[in-house]
Image (spheres, helix red, strand yellow):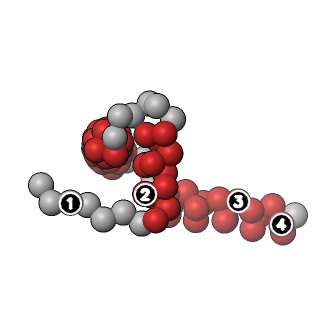
Amino acid sequence: MPNVSLTPELERFAADCVASGRYSNVSEVARAALRMLREAEEERRGFLTMLAAAEAEGVADGFAGADAVAAELDAVIAGAEKR
């Protein structure tokens, strides 16, 4: 695997993590960061999958989309303002 270039800010952060004693070296910091990124990406993919399923369910059940709801709210507000 190639070496990784870090910004000065990230280099300082990694060094501070090592200095804190929590990590033995910068490689451990990088591995921990990549594990966290992988977990975040897995959660993101799961969320997007759930969102797509919910949208498909709503479409199948005939639920109104966001644009339709916004238009209905605009109409209600306009009607209330006329009173």
Judged by depth in the image, the label closer to the viewer, 2 or 4, is: 2
Considering the numbered disc 4 on the image, is that residue within a helix, a strand or a loop?
A: helix
Mark 3 or mark 1: name the one nearer the start of the chain: 1
What residue sits right under mark 3 in the picture?
Answer: 76
Among all residues in the image, which is located at the extreme top?
22
User: In whole angstroms, how far apart are the C-alphas of marks 1 and 4?
Assistant: 63 Å
Residue lying at 83% horizontally and 66% vertically, measured from the top left: 81
Q: How far is disc 2 from disc 1 in space, using C-alphas?
A: 13 Å
Circle 2 residue: 11
The amino acid marked with disc number 4 is Glu
Determine which residue is flagged by label 4. Answer: 81
Amino acid type of the residue tagged 1 in the rendering: Asn
Q: Callout 1: few (<14), some (14-19), or many (20+) C-alpha neighbours within 10 Å?
A: few
Could you give the CA–CA distance between mark 4 and mark 3, rounded to whole angstroms? 9 Å
Q: Residue at x 67, y 65 (%)?
A: 75
Residue 42: x %, y % from top left: 28, 41
Residue 25, percent from left and from top: 34, 40
Q: Amino acid at mark 2?
A: Glu
Distance of mark 2 from mark 4, alpha carbons? 57 Å
Residue 3 marker:
1
Residue 21 visible in the snapshot? yes
| Residue sitting nearer the eye, 38 or 34 | 34
Q: Residues within 10 Å of mark 4 (few under 14, many from 20)?
A: few
Q: Is residue 17 left or right of residue 74?
A: left
